[in-house]
Structure formats: structure tokens, C-alpha cells
Image (cartoon, helix red, strand yellow):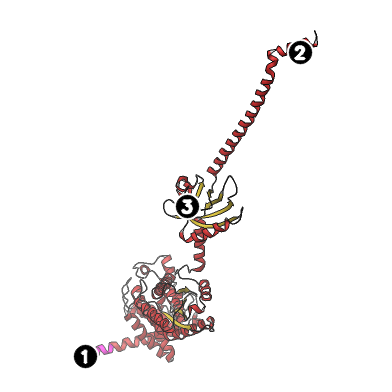
Amino acid sequence: MSRSHFKRNKRKNPILQLVPALKNVAEATKEQEVLWKTQLSLIESEAKHKAILANISNVVSIIDQSGVVIYTTPNITKWFGWQPMDLVGTSGWEKIHPDDLCEYKREFKNLLEKDGLETTRDYRIKCKDSTYKYVKASATNLVRDPQIKGVLISYHEITDMKNREKEILYLSYHDYLTDLYNRAYFEMEKKRLDTVRQLPISVIMGDINGLKLINDGFGHIKGDELLIDIAKILKNCCREEDIIARIGGDEFGILLPRTNSHLAQLICNRISDDCKRYTLSGTQIYPSISLGHATKNAENEAMKDILMIAEECMSRQKLLESKSAHSSIIASIKAIMFEKSQETEEHTERLIQLSKSLGLAMSLNDDQLHELELLCTLHDIGKMSIDANILSKHGKLSYEEWNEMRKHPVVGFRIAQATSELIPIAKYILCHHERWDGKGYPQGLIGEKIPILSRILAIVDSFDAMSNDRSYRSAMTKEEAIEEIRRNSGTQFDPDITQLFLNIILQEMTSTISLEKKHHFIS
């Protein structure tokens, strides 16, 4: 077959004629497939990004250059209560706390000045329930990004962290007990207020009278109550802008900006008057604080010198007031001691008379006699710390109750050591339950190692206790009490002092009998 015949037949073959068309269709299908794949990829990518944005913990928002919200992630509902449609199209400023708004706008304006600039800061966002939550926000300028066209902000809530920071900051500058400022804050504010604008600035320094005495006599709970009451008085007597601080255990400092010396003195007077109107809960004791003040009037005066002058003034005042304050506290303690222990003033008077007779017979000097009288009055002052139920119990004390009772000489010693008027008898109070044979308490002293005034008190107190009615037993006769004292001579009591005491008691009894007989004969 010729070549020309083959060519003629090729042109006439319909199948061969479809080849180009099929080729075009195939090419078109490939293009369509690519297009479909591309579109599918975009759809999948968009769905994936939406899923990511919907599930991330941070809220993501986009704000345009004018501050209008153009997008926010759905999880804003979880954290702040808003639906995305509540915010889109509204001003982003509306939900910022008023106190943070000025700084927020300034940061936003700075952010728009440079493409791609990033910034991070904390501020508060309003929730749908009208409360505010702290957030930490990171913002990026993506105005030129065709997909964003605005500022991208990613933020998460940090309210709990901010509250903890505030609590830590508060504790670092406040006294835990009185809720006043502490010394660290006082020192910081002292420097901050030391400016011409605050002149004249006054300082008040205060020191509580008798805090140790109250701690030892009534316990640290009552001491803490005293500190809290003093703090309340200081707050009531000062202005809101004044800085009141507890700068030591029983010391307070007050900074009074724009306050002259006359006004500072009036504040001191007001504090003292308020103290006298207060009564410590459960006691007959009122709070007492010695105060001193000084004023800085000129810029060239040093604050440290002003504080020193105020402290010196306070120390002088304390010397004048402390004796009367301690005397008042001691009088109150005596009254409460008699009430709690069910001891009577008659018992105290009998002890004083018996011990005085014995002291004179032993040729004690005037100072010793005075101390012996004070010891008879306050030897049981340590019973202030013992539960009233133990002191008034009619039956036998339990082991635990007896151990509690045995603490009162030590407590009494601490109380006496806390005030100058009682220091001379402190060691006698500590030893008034020691025994001649060393079996006493709290130290187990033997013989003449026990102070002589304690040995005298031990005898007269035991004799009077036995020969007069007690809440837990009836009185012995004097003869029975004498015999009991004699039986314990050389074991519980000093034998020499015992013999002298018995001679005095027997002599008094003989004189009393003689007088009674004489009176009967005359009658």
C-alpha cells in the first residue's frame, strides 16, 4: 500500500481525529484537579487554623488602627463571658479598666508607629458580669499583613497571680498582728515624705507601758490584744494620709506630713485620752503608751535628727508615766488575783502581821521588812496564768492540774522581773515553794540556799492556810496547825525560823488567853 493511501485513510479515521480533543480534555482535567486540590488545601488549612484558634488557651483578638475590634476567638466566652459578636465592631477601649485606659492607649499609639513592633503589658478587662480580670497581653503591629490588617493581641488571665502579688506586697509592708505598716514601710515613707512640699512634717514615737507585765501576768494572747487595741486607738486619732507603723515589739512610729508641732501635740493628747477610755478585754487594765513628738520645719534639718528628738522626748515621758502605769497594772493584777485564786485581803493582812512579827524577832532591817510585806501581798501573783477552774477546784487536783499549778512561782518571777517596783522580790516569789529538804519546786533548793524571806513566807503562809477555812477544806484549830508546823520542821521548813515562829505564836496565844480570863474576871 502506498504512503499516500495511508495518509488519506488517516485523515478520514474518526478515532484518530478525536486524539487532540481528548488531549485537551485531559489537560483541562489536570488543571481542574490542581485547582481543586489547591482549594481543598486552603479549606483544610482554614479549618485547621480555626480549630487551633478555637482550642488555644489564649484569647486572640484583632483590632484595627482606630481601635475597633474586627475579630476575636470564641474562647473569649469561657474567660470573660462575652460572645465574639458582642465585641466585633465595637471599640476596644470600652472593655479596658478606666485606671488602665490611658496607659493602654499610649502603648497602642506607640505600637502603630512601626510595622512588626511587639509589646507586652498587664491590664484589666471588663467581664460581662461587670467585674474585671487582669490579663497579660502581647500585641504585634500587623497592619500591613493582608491577612490581618490590624494589631494582633494575644492575652490570658492572670488575676490569681496579681492577687498573690498584692498579698505578698501587702505582707511585706504590714505588721501581721496590728495590720499597721511595718518598719520597712515606715523607713521608705520617711524618705519619700522628706520633701519641701510636705513641710512642716512631724513625727510621733510611742512605746507601750507594761506590755511585758501583761504578757507574763495574763498571757501573750492578752498582750496581743493590747497591741491591737493600741493600733485601733492610733488609727482613730490620726488622719488617713498619716503613716502609722509598728516599728518594734512595743514601739510605734507615726509620720504626720504637713503637720506643725502644736497639732502633733494635740494628736498625742487625743491618743492618751482615748487610752484611758479603753479597757483591755476581760481585765481591769487600760492600755497605756508613752509618746514623744518632734517637727521638721526647714529643709536643711535632717529627718534622722527629728526622729532622735522624738525618741528622746518619748523616753522622758516614759520615765514620768511608767511608774504610775505599772502601779495601776499591779493594782489591777492584785484585784484579779484575789478574785481568781479566792484568796482574801484578810489573808494577806494576816500574813503581813505574822511575817512582820517574825521579821522583827529576826532583826531584819527596814528594807527587808518592806520587801517581806510586798512579798506577802504578791507572792501568788503567778496564779494569774492558771485556769480559774483549777484554782477553785474542791477535790484533789489531777496530775496535769498539779503540774499547771506548780508553774505559778516561775510565772510570778517573770511578772516581778517585768516591773521595777517588784524586781527586789522576784527571787523570793520564785522560791516561796522551795523546801528545806530540797524536795520543793521549782528549783529543788536545799537549806540556806533558799532566800530567807521565802523561808519566812513558807511558814507563815502554811500556818494561816491551815488555821483558816479554805474552799476545799475546813480550818484546823490553832493547836493542830502548830503541831503540823512542828512536825514539818527540818523537812519542809527552816528549823530555826520554825522554832522562833512557834514561840511567837504560842506567846500570842498565851497573851490572848490571859486577856480573855482577865476580861471574864472583870465581867
Q: Is residue 85 magenta?
A: no
17 w.r.t. 467: above or below: above
Q: Amino acid at mark 1?
A: Phe
Q: Secondary structure at mark 2?
A: helix
Which range is magenta? 513-523
- Could you say whether the residue bearing mark 3 is in a helix, strand or loop? loop
Residue matched to label 1: 521
Determine whether, in the image, residue 200 is placed left or right of residue 143: left
Q: Which residue in the structure is indicated by mark 3?
A: 91
| Residue identifier under label 2 | 7
Residue 166 at x, y percent in the picture:
50, 62
Residue 516 within the magenta-colored segment of the rendering: yes
Q: Please give the name of the residue rendered at 57% of the width and 46% of the height, measured from the top-left corner.
A: 148
Residue 283 in sight here = yes
CA gap between label 1 and label 2 equals 184 Å
Please identify the residue farthest to the right as the structure is shown: 2
> Of marks 2 and 3, which one's residue comes earlier in the chain?
2
Tags 1 and 2 in contact by the CB under 8 Å rule? no
Looking at the rendered structure, the kind of residue marked 2 is Lys
